[in-house]
Amino acid sequence: MERALIEATLVRYPANYETTNRRPVDQAFADAMANVYATYPDDHNIASIYAVALFLLEDRRGYRDLADPDLQRLHGVLTRVLAQDIKHPGACHLYIHATESSQQPERALACADHLASTVPLASHIQHMPSHTWNEVGLWGRSVRANTAAKNADLLAAQGKGFSYGPTHNLHMLLFAASYDGQGAVATQAGKDYRKYAGDAQFEATTLIRFGRFDEVLALNHRPDNGASAAIYDFAKGYAMLKSGDLAGAETTLKTLQGYIATTKDKIRFHPAKTVVGVLTHILAGEISVTQGDTEAALEAFTQAVSLEDALDYDEPEPLPFAARHWLGQTLLDAGQPSRAEAVFRDELKDHPHNGWSLHGLQQSLAARGMDDPAVNEDLQKSWARADIWLSGAKF
């Protein structure tokens, strides 16, 4: 068994390996591990390594068709292990990744419930269940998971644990807390991210999410990175607008429009012009709202939604809020509750059980003299950990 694994590993790491031409090497490794797996089909660790090899051949970005034969083969290897050992950390870790961007991320819920307990001092294992929980709208669980991951990172710094991806853990924490209404947790995670990574974009955007505009104006940590700086500038411009400085907001808008017209920057693998474009249209729309031009605002927010929908799958997403929150709330405020209802229902498909959208949906129904007990119950449960009082889907 050990000889077979060593020989397969030599295939995976050949001499003179060219990272720009990975596919032939990845395929050769998958073929080698297929032989090892065929010889030892009941060894769960070998099955997990074989699944790694198959996973290297798959595209993690974008929703994948569960009917695809290659994906079914990968799932088959993993579910065979999990049927016998639901707590196997290797198989569960991979199964979460293999389902998170599919049409049925809930397939990994059973193993997600057990994964953290398998390696308590490994931050990445504490964090991993949140990839499933975010997709199904279990935001409170995701907050707890990434809090545990953050604490494991802190223990690792003292030689008492294993750290992997501390900035990713903080990003996921602030994202989940933002959708869960936990403003104190989200904004602190944004601040911690800035201290750890030297990037204040999430500190700024979480403060915008929770309407803490005076604190945004007090920030003095503009990032050096062009894309991060643009996101930070959006937050400043939005806070200016909400603090009565329309001229400052309009100046910021022009700066952002100039940036997206010329930039070739990336935010992870997303084009910065798309991510910052979402924010640019949100700011433009909010300026139009302030000026009383509802039609222009709706057009701007609709463009923001279109750009947001064009982003590839990512976990977490680059922004801790959704453009549809602005579009739906503006429709509601403009006396168009039926259209607002449709927007909030669409948003809940992207981010299930989030209070921002549920509140907007509840208000859209109330404006038409309607009441839905299921929506009311969902909002009560989903917002149970929130530390803010909602007056709308956005501040």
Image (cartoon, helix red, strand yellow):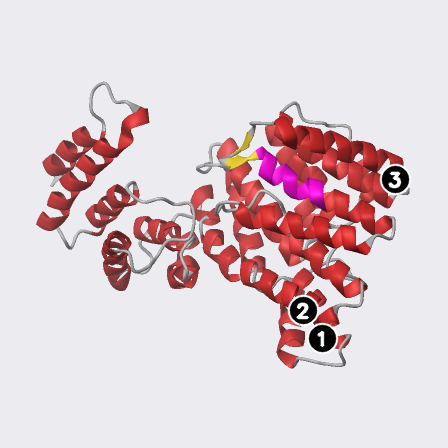
Badge 3: how crowded within 10 Å, few (<14), some, or many (20+)? Answer: some
Residue 169's disc is none
- As drawn, is 386 to the left or to the right of 21? right
How far across and how far down the image is residue 134, in percent? 52, 55
C-alpha separation, residue under disc 3 versus residue under disc 1 = 33 Å
What is the three-letter code of the residue carrying label 1?
Leu
Residue beneath disc 3: 246
Q: Main secondary structure of the magenta part?
A: helix
Residue beneath disc 2: 341
Magenta residues span 272-281
Q: Looking at the figure, which quarter contains the N terminus?
A: top left
Rendering quarter of residue 281: top right
The answer to whether the residues at label 1 and label 2 have Cβ atoms under 8 Å apart is yes
Residue at the extreme left: 39
Counting residues from the start of the chain, the first of labels 3 and 2 encountered is 3
Badge 1: how crowded within 10 Å, few (<14), some, or many (20+)? Answer: some
